Image: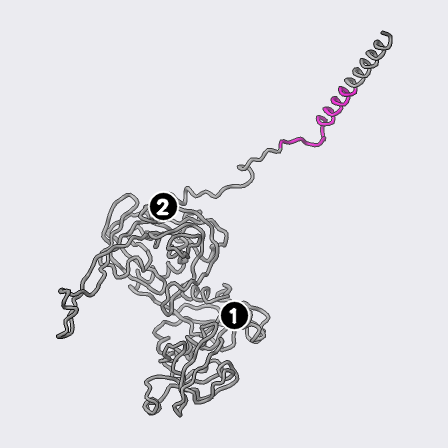
């Protein structure tokens, strides 16, 4: 019993000591955490509202919806048919088909740009339409008439007879930044007044969708979802300003797969302004033949910098020649805006009018020069390009005389009268060679030659004939 009582007393003593130590430690911690100047104690829960501000799309969407319209265009699809099935197998003479027109329609979008009913849309939405119906966001319907179409930018201006309409104000597409939030507003799949959001993925994209010579492609690329029916709709920033007209998607299926393209609003303003003021486009040009600079070309030329556009040649008497630009110059800036590719150059030119003055910064033999250039109209371009002589890739080409054409039984072609070191000479071509086609396309003008032999990259096939009648083919890498 004495032993058990001793153990119990020892246990009791140990418990009392433990409780006393715990209480002393707890009090000390409380004092340390409570005294002035101590280490602050804070909760570490996550508050997303305090971390960053989400972009607010509500105001931009509200102002855009009423200014974007639904367009239904009606067309006539023409085909040839035979009145009598057996007439097709008429062995007694040639069958006589008749033209048959079959109506069909297409849907698109448009943006009201003035309160008196002017609406901008894509050219491919209304081109050759026989009837255009416009439905506003409040369901009012109107017949529209075409004011002007411009295939080179894929823009068109139409008008409805109404006043005091809601419209979108122009932003400035030059100020658009990659990563900036944007909204796409339109009517995909006939789902009227649809708004999607995304960011600007890239600028100055040339996707070779327009195809026509002289086309201006410098699209704003976004990941805002658009689909068939969005064409001609608005691309707006978070302030509700129009910064582009949605025009295309990159897709193997015909539906949105992640990339959308819009025409910059600065080009839109130019086209709309010309149609309103002149009834047609006042296109400016600078008169240069150029190529983009890639790593291989830079190594060939000994360039340490890949920035800029390389000038192969200038049009005699054109704006660039008058301003003092020369073949071999590298255009690096226009009006202090960097130029690094065809799309950027075409966008800058596409915003200008004949008579506008710009400052061109060129790199010439490692030194920068500032040149004052005055834009000319395309009419002067056509006159300047009627020259029958040009130097391209180290070869001087001259138009054939009537006697030379008759002797070789050809009706077009350009003869090389002089040849210096360059890609044509390196390929084995000799002076006297008459160039007929480039990649099987006839060379009927100096402009054709310069377009095919300067504004190209990669391999080309040249076909021609020598004065003795010998046909020759050359593959050349440009």
The colour scheme applied to this rendered structure is one colour
Q: CA distance from mark 1 to mark 2?
A: 41 Å
Residue occupying the point 42% across, 59% down: 219
The quarter of the displayed image where residue 408 is located = bottom left
Give the quarter of the figure containing the N terminus.
top right
Range covered by the magenta-colored residues: 21-43
The picture places residue 60, in percent across and down from the top left corner, at 41, 45
Please give left or right for residue 473 compared with residue 303 in the image.
Answer: left
Q: Which residue is mark 1?
A: 293
Q: Secondary structure at mark 1?
A: loop
387 and 402: which is toward the camera: 402
Label whose residue precedes the other's in the sequence (1 or 2): 2
Residue 282 magenta: no
Q: Check the image and report above or below for 4 versus 245.
A: above
The circle drawn on residue 194 is: 2
Q: Main secondary structure of the magenta part?
A: helix
The quarter of the displayed image where residue 295 is located = bottom right
The picture places residue 392, in percent across and down from the top left corner, at 46, 80
The picture places residue 185, in percent across and down from the top left corner, at 37, 48
Please give left or right for residue 409 compared with residue 204 in the image.
Answer: left
């Amino acid at each position: 019993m004495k032993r058990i009582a001793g153990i119990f007393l020892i246990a009791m003593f140990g418990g009392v000591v433990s409780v006393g130590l715990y209480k002393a430690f707890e009090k000390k911690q409380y004092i340390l955490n409570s005294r002035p100047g101590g280490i602050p104690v804070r909760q570490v829960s996550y508050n997303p509202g305090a971390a960053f501000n989400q972009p607010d799309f509500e105001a931009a969407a509200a102002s855009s919806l009423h200014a974007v319209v639904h367009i239904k265009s009606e067309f006539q699809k023409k085909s040839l048919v035979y009145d009598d099935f057996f007439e097709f197998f008429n062995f007694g003479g040639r069958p006589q088909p008749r033209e048959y027109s079959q109506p069909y329609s297409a849907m698109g979008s448009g943006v009201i740009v003035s309160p008196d009913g002017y609406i901008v849309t894509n050219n491919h939405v209304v081109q050759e339409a026989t009837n255009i119906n416009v439905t506003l966001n409040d369901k009012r319907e109107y017949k529209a008439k075409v004011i002007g179409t411009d295939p080179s930018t894929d823009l068109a201006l139409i008008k409805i007879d109404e006043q005091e309409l809601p419209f979108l104000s122009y932003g400035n597409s030059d100020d658009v930044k990659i990563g900036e939030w944007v909204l796409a507003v339109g009517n995909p799949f006939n789902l009227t007044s649809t708004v999607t959001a995304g960011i600007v993925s890239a600028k100055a994209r040339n996707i070779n969708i327009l195809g026509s010579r002289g086309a201006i492609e410098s699209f704003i690329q976004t990941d805002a979802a658009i689909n068939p029916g969005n064409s001609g709709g608005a691309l707006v920033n978070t302030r509700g300003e129009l910064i582009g007209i949605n025009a295309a998607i990159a897709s193997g299926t015909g539906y949105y797969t992640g990339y959308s393209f819009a025409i910059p609003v600065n080009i839109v303003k130019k086209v709309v302004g010309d149609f309103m003021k002149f009834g047609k486009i006042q296109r400016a040009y600078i008169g240069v033949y150029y190529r983009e600079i890639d790593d291989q070309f830079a190594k060939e030329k000994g360039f340490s910098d890949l920035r800029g556009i390389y000038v192969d040649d200038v049009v005699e008497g054109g704006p660039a020649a008058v301003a003092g630009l020369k073949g071999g110059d590298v255009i690096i800036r226009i009006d202090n805006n960097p130029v690094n590719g065809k799309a950027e150059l075409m966008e800058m030119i596409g915003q200008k009018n004949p008579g506008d003055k710009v400052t061109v910064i060129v790199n010439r033999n490692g030194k920068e020069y500032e040149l004052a250039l005055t834009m000319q109209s395309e009419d002067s371009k056509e006159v300047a390009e009627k020259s029958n002589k040009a130097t391209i890739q180290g070869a001087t080409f001259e138009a054939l005389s009537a006697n030379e054409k008759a002797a070789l039984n050809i009706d077009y072609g350009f003869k090389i009268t002089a040849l210096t070191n360059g890609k044509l000479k390196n390929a084995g071509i000799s002076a006297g060679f008459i160039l007929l086609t480039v990649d099987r396309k006839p060379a009927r003008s100096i402009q054709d030659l310069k377009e095919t032999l300067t504004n190209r990259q990669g391999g080309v096939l040249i076909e021609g004939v020598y004065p003795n009648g010998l046909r020759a083919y050359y593959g050349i890498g440009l």
